[in-house]
Amino acid sequence: MESTRKHLIELLTKQEGHISGQQLSEQLNISRTAVWKHMNELKKDGYEIEAVQRKGYKIHGFPDKISENTLQWGLETRWMGHQLYHYDQVESTQEIVHQMAKQGKPHGTVVVADEQVGGKGRMARSWDSPKGKGIWMSFLLKPDLPPVEAPQLTLLAATVIAKMIDERSDLEPQIKWPNDVLIHHKKVSGILTEMQAEQDTIQYIVLGIGMNVNQEEEDIPSDIRYKASSFKIESGLDWNIQKTIQHFLTLFESSYDQFIRDGFQSVKEDWEKYGYKIGENVTISTMKETWEATLLGIEPDGALRARRKTGEEEKLYSAEIHWGEGGYLA
Ligand code: BTN
């Protein structure tokens, strides 16, 4: 966005009451006529701006299209998303956050894109990210944790997505270990965690979240339609992407703070509320073998606990879970 316009929106957003044309012209270093012209342009773009004689201007509402300003408007977090960047189209928000980490951007920096043309999934898969239909977002975290605990953050993110869906709808989200969020047995959201670590310290983590929000059936690639869906398909309702992002960021911040303060226990409890196929029989594939198992739950460190037919119990850090008729390998 043009920088004067961006600055103008920032000034209007920060101001509690009205801000006068004079103040705006001084702070933006432009004439009062230019301020007035910018206001008219903003109104045309869907910003709701009130102009009151002798008091000045006040912003009341933002357009539907998401932008840095609309995302930050009304976002009441303490650190999450205080640096927030929005792009119309990117290869992958993951790459942008990696670059930002190298430039020294702070913990909690968020990058959101309307569309990704090279969206990445786990295990070198691609992630379909059509324009304006979902939430394609990555953020930078710099936790003071040993690298072995990083996967717990992925489980945390999955519980936050599930909680957010739960709070915003009548849907009953579930989490397929470790971190696929499902609705009515179909995947609607995935998480990609990438870490830069040195010996015993995490330098930074890039946590990428993909949420299929407003896709219609025909927007989902036909080869994955049997196993992938969207919030809209499952709820029959259009979701407001801006509010959904804000809700997610707010919940994420408080769950993250609690996790750093009290450890994984609180995440474990939430995860178990949404855990998929816990107590049920599934097939598990690891690098070494494929076997029939009963899922038992998660361990205090986030690992999956499963029981073999022979009764032996296993603790797994990396595995694929699949199940019978219609079940899938994710
Ligand atoms: C998965 O389930 O395989 C993980 C999918 C992660 C997708 C998100 S979308 C935002 C971020 N940018 C990417 O390229 N990938 C993640």
Image (tube, rainbow, N blue to C red):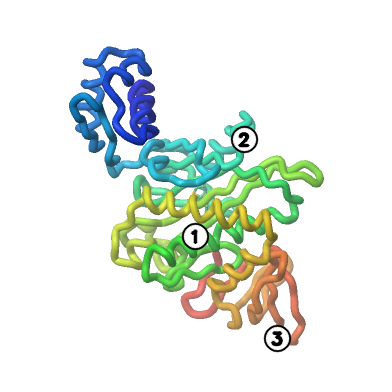
Kind of residue at badge 1: Ile
Q: What residue is disc 1 on?
A: 161
Q: In terms of image quadrants, where is residue 201? A: top right
Number of numbered discs: 3
Q: Are marks 2 and 3 in contact (CB under 8 Å)?
A: no
Residue at the location (39% across, 63% down)? Answer: 168
> Distance from label 1 to label 3 (Cα)?
33 Å
Residue at disc 1, secondary structure: helix
| Nearer to me, 284 or 249 | 249
Q: In terms of image quadrants, where is residue 283? A: bottom right
Kind of residue at badge 3: Lys
| Nearer to me, 151 or 242 | 242
- Looking at this rendering, what residue extends furthest in the front direction? 54
Residue at disc 2, secondary structure: helix
| Quadrant of the drawing holding the N terminus | top left
Q: What residue is disc 2 on?
A: 101
**Tag on residue 309?**
3
**Tag on residue 89?**
none
Question: At which x and y percent is residue 234?
Answer: 35, 67
